[in-house]
Each structure stands twice: as C-alpha cells, then as structure tokens.
Image (spheres, rainbow, N blue to C red):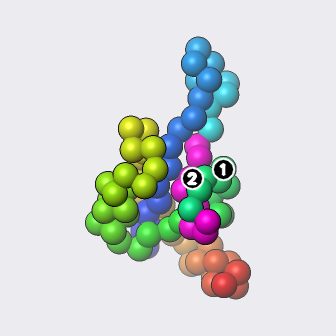
C-alpha cells in the first residue's frame, strides 16, 4: 500500500551533503517536523497534491513523496490514535 506526504529539503548552501535534512509537514498544528512518524499522511495522491497547491506552505521548495506503507507501521499509527 502507498501513502503520500509533503516535505521540503533544508540545507546549508555549500554544505548540502553534510547538513541537509528533510522537513516533513505535520498535521496539528500545521507546521514542520523532522521525524517521519509525526508527518501528515495522505491516502490519496490527488488529495496531497491539492493540499500542496493551496499555497499553505513554502510552495517553491515543496516535494510530494510516496511512502511504501507496511502493515506494521499502520498498526503503530492506529495505536497512537
């Protein structure tokens, strides 16, 4: 199963390899986190694309990524709810 998430890559100019990190869009309150476990997950690609195109965040550097969703991870998410 696949899920979708929105992220952007933050890096220091000239040191992209050493100091880059992926910042994920979180759900509540709407902001940014560095841990995938805290990310806002979309079930539908078009839903994620629509959200990304609303300009709610830094649109010039946003990326939509596909996550290969495993049942074990999904069960952990359900337990958190």
Residue farthest top in this picture = 14
**Pointer 2 local density, CA inside 10 Å: few below 14, some 14–19, many at least 20:** many
Q: Quadrant of the N terminus?
A: bottom left
The residue at the point 64 percent across, 78 percent down is: 77
Magenta segment boundaries in residue numbering: 22-29
Image quadrant assignment for residue 56: bottom left
Looking at the image, tell me whether mark 2 or mark 1 is earlier in sequence order.
2
* Cβ–Cβ under 8 Å for marks 2 and 1: yes
25 part of magenta stretch:
yes
In the image, is 49 to the left or to the right of 20? left
Q: Which residue is drawn at the image coordinates 63% and 19% (left, top)? A: 15
Instruction: Look at the picture and state if 22 lies above or below 42.
Output: above
Residue 18 screen position, x and y as percent: 67, 24
Alpha carbon separation for disc pair 2 and 1: 6 Å
- In the rendered structure, find residue 24 and report the number of the disc placed on it: 2
Q: Residue 74, image x and y in percent?
A: 59, 78
State the residue in front, 64 or 58: 58
């Amino acid at each position: 199963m696949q899920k979708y998430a929105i992220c952007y890559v933050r890096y220091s100019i000239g040191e992209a390899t050493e100091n880059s990190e992926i910042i994920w869009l979180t759900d509540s309150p709407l902001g940014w986190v560095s841990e995938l476990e805290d990310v806002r997950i979309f079930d539908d690609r078009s839903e994620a694309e629509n959200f990304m195109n609303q300009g709610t965040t830094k649109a010039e550097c946003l990326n939509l990524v596909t996550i290969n969703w495993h049942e074990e991870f999904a069960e952990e998410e359900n337990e958190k709810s």
